[in-house]
Structures are given as C-alpha cells and as structure tokens.
Amino acid sequence: MKLRILGCSGGIGGRHLRTTSMLLDHDILIDAGTGVGELSLTELSLVDHIFLTHSHLDHVTSIPFIVDTVGAMRTRPLTVHAIPQTIEILKNHIFNWLIWPDFAQIPTPDQPYLRYEEVQIGQTVSLGTRSLTALPANHTVPAIGYHLSSGKGSLVFTGDTSDNDKFWPIVNRIADLRVLIIETAFCNRERELAIAAKHLCPSMLAEELAKLQRSPDIFITHLKPGEIELTMEEIERCAGQFRPMMLQNNQVFEF
C-alpha cells in the first residue's frame, strides 16, 4: 500500500497549505479537503472510494467538486464511506439541492454519480488485500480515525481528536504498526481553546502519546497556519522523546 499526503494543514494559504486529504494507492481517498486539488483530472477519475473521518468542511470540501467533475467520466458511482452521522450531515447540509445538487439521485436514482456506505467504529472494510478499520475519535462532531493495513504493515490516522482513552488500547494491539499520524491543531497558549474545540495542543499530545505502547514513526498533522513553527517547537519540548515529525504535503508512506 502507498499513502500519498495531498493536504495536512489546519488551514489554507498557498500550495504548501492544503487541508486534510490522503490518496491511498490510486483509488481511495482518506478525507477530501482542499488537498484533493493537487490531483489531475485523470487521477480524480480513478478514485472509487472516499473514507471520511468526520463532516467538518476542511475534510469534505472537495467531494462536491470531485463528483461534479468526473461523475460523467466514470462507469460506477463514487462511494463515500462514513459513520451514519456523517452521512446524514452530508445529505442534509451539502447535497441538499441548496448548497449542491444531490448526486446520489442524479443523473438517475438507479445510476447515480455518488453513493454512501455506512461504517461503524470497529468495522473493517476490505478492498482486495487492503483493509481499513474505523477507530474511535473524540471531536465536536461524531468522528473516527482509521487503521490502514496491507497485511504486511499498518498505518494509523487519528483524524481530528482530543484526549481519547478508547483509542489507545486498540492501537497498542496493532503488532505491525509502522506509522502514526496524529493531529495537533493548537499551540500551548491555546490549550483551553483546544479543549473546547476537541483538538490537541503540544502538552495534550504528550499526555496522549504517553499511552502509546508501540514504537511507530510519529507524524504531526493539522497544524494551524501562522503557528506551525511555534507549535512544532513546543511539541519538541513536550514530547520530544517520541521523536515526532511534521507531516508534509506529497510525503509518501509505503507499508
């Protein structure tokens, strides 16, 4: 399996600041933030599945454009995999004919451009030799993370989350865990905001990583523009023993 980072920023502001999206092999997106804009028309047409962590705009904003752009080029619907609450939000607040057409009904209900597939926490979706398992997250809206497995190695993405005691026992059972991608959205002076928004700051990150019993490479995502250098310096001070690194656009993981 090959995971390419298309966007990993907590905001926008140039080519190096694109919101969360990752391309797994050539046909699966993990979230669909503004990073999807890095893909060519041909690459977009090859995407068959989108696995969403949650419904916030920085993670779903490109879905309407993808389906509108390449729907007619494809022979089958684009499948969006998400927990039921996220699917309901997409239906009610985006694909509602007011913000965007309902592509689950057009061109026809029998042959739509878009379809939904519910996943539950703990459920594994197998696509060939690849598996994606939904993990618990703790955010302001219902949310999940993902465990990606090739059968030879694993990568875990927390999604947007705060302190999360349900998450770590599951992760600690993944014997072949190679990479952990975990968010840190705020600097330490904004700890109270991080708690209210159910994100992490460096001191909270250190508290969470202390629960990790594996030794994967750790990468930090969702850094806020304008606070990247400060937050990474604070992460080094608070959690340097875990050797966390900043996630980068176009970084590729093979596992």
Image (cartoon, helix red, strand yellow):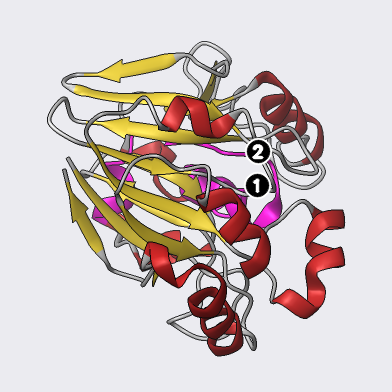
Label 1's element?
A: loop
Q: Find residue 73 and report its image quarter.
A: top left
Residue 190 as seen in the image, left or right of residue 35: right
Disc 1: CA contacts within 10 A as few (<14), some (14-19) or many (>=20): many
Residue 164 visible somewhere in the drawing: yes
In magenta segment, residue 10? no
- What residue range appears in magenta? 42-68
User: Residue 164, which numbered label?
Assistant: 2
Q: What residue type is labelled 2?
A: Asn
Q: Which amino acid does label 1 sit on?
A: Thr
Residue 218 as seen in the image, left or right of residue 103: left
Residue in view at x 77 percent, y 51 percent:
198
Q: Where is residue 49 in the image (x, y as percent from the top left)?
A: 39, 32
In magenta segment, residue 64? yes
Q: Position of residue 121 (x, y in %)?
A: 57, 19
Q: Find residue 197 and report its image quarter.
A: bottom right
Image quarter (top left, top right, bottom left or bottom right) of the C terminus: top left
* Residue at the disc numbered 1: 161
Residue in view at x 36 percent, y 72 percent:
248
Q: Position of residue 3 (x, y in %)?
A: 26, 50
Relative to 28, is 16 above or below?
below
Disc 2: CA contacts within 10 A as few (<14), some (14-19) or many (>=20): some
Q: Where is residue 187 in the image (x, y as percent from the top left)?
A: 69, 76
Residue in view at x 67 percent, y 26 percent:
87
Label 2's element?
A: loop
Distance from disc 1 to disc 2, alpha carbons, whole Å, reads 7 Å
